[in-house]
Image: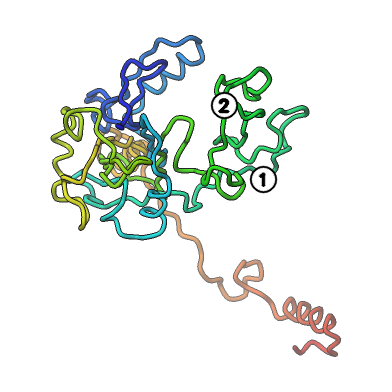
Amino acid sequence: FSVVWDLEYKPLPDIPFPNDYALLIDNSTPTGLRMNISLIAPTGVEEELRRRAQALDGFGTFAPITVRFDALLDIQNIIDRQRNNTNPGDDVALVINISPQSPGYGNIHPIDFGHGYFPTTVQDPFFYFAHDPRAGGASLVFETFDEDLNGNGVLDPGEDSDGDGVLDKPNVFPADASPWDNLLTFYERETDSLILRPMVPLREQTQYAVVLTRHLVDKAGEPIRSPFPYVSLAAQNDELKALHELLPEGLEVKDVAFAWSFTTQSVSNDLRTVRAGLYGHGSMNWLNERYPPTLSLDPVRSEPGDRNSLYHVSGEDLDHVTTLISASFGVQGSTV
């Protein structure tokens, strides 16, 4: 079985995402890249959404990473390797910083594999509206209902409670477990998709490699395969060469089943440009002349005899306060 790579899939190509393959070179942006998205859409709202997405110069720093397969993965194998030990040398998937100029170059980014960092169960499953056919559902993100009411394995009339045309099964592990306690948050059974969620934000304007190793296997124990003759897209080979020296101890290049790269967007570039301009540098250096710095001194001590000073408390005022305090504790006089 292999990774799914379908450029003709509609409405958008079905490829591992985020992916540098979905970016165009654009020297006018901070990253030198821009999203490559078709503007052809069935509605004006979606067309506008796509147009705005085209302005992005990379991918989100805290967004999930998804990759789909053409067969079911061995879920227990993933849990054993990712959740029950801390050795990256036997991991099924890694996210590695491959930007040489980055302070975090070579770092392996922590990924949530159902550790509980991203809970997806709802607080009140009956909160939404009357006659909700999905009232009582444990999650709005993943499937929690078994629609096969008669157990015949076919979507019969009246069973499709969410109207998606798919015979839904709860996205849980083990298969007969409760979705409240055993919801799969790193894998979607309906699409056979692995979901990698960064535990902390990625660095902005940084290129990362997603590495799927031969430890990622199907139910028969067979490792995944690349959709190409090689372990990566030819257009990304140069960027991924860094993996030869960045793989953790216990992993070699021959252990890589598939890899791809993606670049994060600029986040604070506008703020840094404004700050540089206030100091007279960069494209907004005119800010330094228009808004010059001003210095004003606030008094830190009062002049003797100034009873209106914020820093002066008279003995008369203090005596009144101590009298109230002592009275509240039943003490005579103003001594506390």
Q: Nearer the viewer, residue 310 or 324?
A: 324
Q: Residues within 10 Å of mark 1 (few under 14, many from 20)?
A: few
- The N terminus sits in image quarter: top left
- Res. 197 mark: none
Residue under numbered circle 2:
153
**As drawn, 315 above or below 151:** below
Q: Earlier in the sequence, mark 2 or mark 1?
A: 1
**As drawn, 53 above or below 121:** above
Q: Position of residue 208 (x, y in %)?
A: 27, 41
Q: Position of residue 217 (x, y in %)?
A: 32, 42
Is residue 247 left or right of 39 when viewed as pictured?
A: left
Is residue 270 left or right of 124 when viewed as pictured?
A: left
Q: Quadrant of residue 311?
A: bottom right
Which residue is at 47% across, 53% downward? 115
- The C terminus sits in image quarter: bottom right
Q: Position of residue 185 (x, y in %)?
A: 49, 43
Which residue is at 38% across, 41% downward? 219
Q: Quadrant of residue 11?
A: top left
Q: Nearer the viewer, residue 232 or 73?
A: 73
What is the distance, in whole Å, between disc 2 and disc 1 at their CAs?
31 Å
Is residue 170 left or right of 266 when viewed as pictured?
A: right
- Res. 123 mark: 1
- Mark 2 element type: loop
Q: Is residue 113 visible?
A: yes
- Of badges 2 and 1, the one in the foreground is 2
Q: Nearer the viewer, residue 99 or 145?
A: 145
- Count all numbered tags in the image, as a single digit: 2
Which residue is at 42% across, 49% downward? 76
Amino acid carrying mark 2 in the image: Gly
